[in-house]
Amino acid sequence: MAKTALLTGITGQDGSYLAEFLLARGYEVHGIIRRASTFNTGRLEHIYADPHSGRARLFLHYGDLSDASALARLIAKIRPEEVYNLAAQSHVRVSFDSPEYTTDVTATGAVRLLEAIREVGLPVRYYQASSSEMFGKVREVPQTETTPFYPRSPYGCAKVYAYWITVNYRESYGVHASNGILFNHESPRRGETFVTRKITRAVAHILAGLQDKLYLGNLDAKRDWGYAKEYVEAMWLMLQQEQPDDYIIATNETHSIREFLDAAFGAVNLDWKRHVEIDPRYYRPAEVDLLIGDYGKARRQLGWEPKTKFADLVKLMVDADIQLLKDHREGKIKVTA
Ligand code: NAP
Ligand code: F7E
């Protein structure tokens, strides 16, 4: 019989890829969405537009990670076999401006969901979207599942709480609960205020003559960037294991923002130094200088490996933003007035 999965954060980058992945495997997929004054389901619209996409098995419900009773009600009603907690206030810079809100959603949201699972008393398998931001001021290079955490932002601190409460529900109540410690992963669906997408979107606009300057913050930080579409398979694999566990998902390569700029502007023969200006507003009160993840445990136990290399990831994002802009200009995309 088809399995049922419940996703928080289904409208986000990872949620949309995971929904596609699960629908393709015959799952009935339920997603929690927030009420907004504008449409927030843009990343899911193609599923509804394509009759072969499994749209008949996709169900969206209003809810919020700050609303425990709604979460409990949805878990009891849907009775999912698998719950993927992908929702978060996920922007590190924003977490310095809204630390309490970030804690409420990103940290306390996880325990609200775990409590709803415990209360319902069903054998639900739980995935927690943990983050390389927990390593922050890194204690070891590369980072592994045993590297101590040293978060550098309210977001990182909130993710450390969510990580440990997931371990705690596994050890205290026997919940099949796993942490995926995912390093940065990007795609054409990446939010436009994260640095990779901000850059590739700007490349498309500069190329089209619609923009001249791109304002950025710290160009020296280094990140382990992978392709989001591949990372959602690792989430699913974790919940298919007999025993719950915690896994690093990464590429074991690191590149600076400068290198990303070289690759993105270089892909269309532009020189980023003519366009990029530094705006200190984008600096963070405390920075994460270097992330690089060892995914050896995931390779050995899940059989998971990253496939898309850095240069190909940058190129596919640049190409997608150029195409998106072209479609917009040709009126192929309906803009809600
Ligand atoms: P994203 O694109 O920012 O999506 C975040 C999702 O959370 C959106 O669906 C958003 O809904 C939802 N959300 C935010 N606040 C909520 C609330 N109060 N109640 C319910 N839903 C709420 O993030 P992503 O890149 O897909 O990442 C998915 C998860 O992995 C996040 O938990 C993130 O922190 C974590 N993570 C991401 C990365 C990465 O590199 N992408 C790496 C490690 C961990 P709206 O659409 O309505 O805003
Ligand atoms: O910043 C620098 C910035 O915002 C990357 C989230 O998905 O991955 C993400 O967090 C780096 C930082 O991602 C700008 O200072 C320079 O060093 O793209 P980002 P992040 O902070 O690494 C982790 C794994 C998550 O879990 C998070 O949810 O780029 N940077 N100039 C800039 N960053 C931004 N956003 N904007 C700039 O203008």
Image: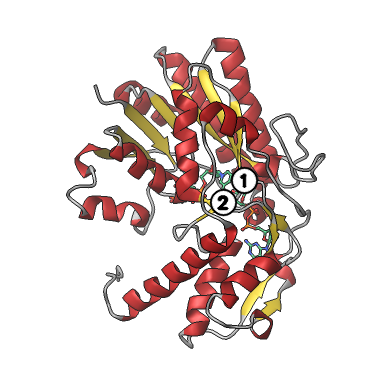
Structural crowding at the residue carrying mark 1, measured as other residues with C-alpha within 10 Å and reported as few (<14), some (14–19) or many (≥20): many
Which numbered circle lies on residue 183?
1
**26 to the left or right of 43:** left
User: Residue shown at 32%/75% (left/top)?
Assistant: 327
Which numbered circle lies on residue 226?
2
Q: CA distance from mark 1 to mark 2?
A: 8 Å
| Residue 93 percent location from the top left of the image | 66, 56
**72 to the left or right of 291:** left
Q: Is residue 14 above or below residue 235?
A: below
| Residue 281 percent location from the top left of the image | 71, 68
User: Residue shown at 66%/31% (left/top)?
Assistant: 161
Closer to the chain start, of discs 1 and 2, is 1
Q: How many marks?
A: 2
The amino acid pointed to by label 2 is: Gly
**20 to the left or right of 307:** left
Single out the residue that lies furthest toward the left: 51
Discs 1, 2 touching: Cβ within 8 Å: yes
Q: Is residue 67 visible?
A: no
Q: Is residue 336 above or below residue 157?
A: below
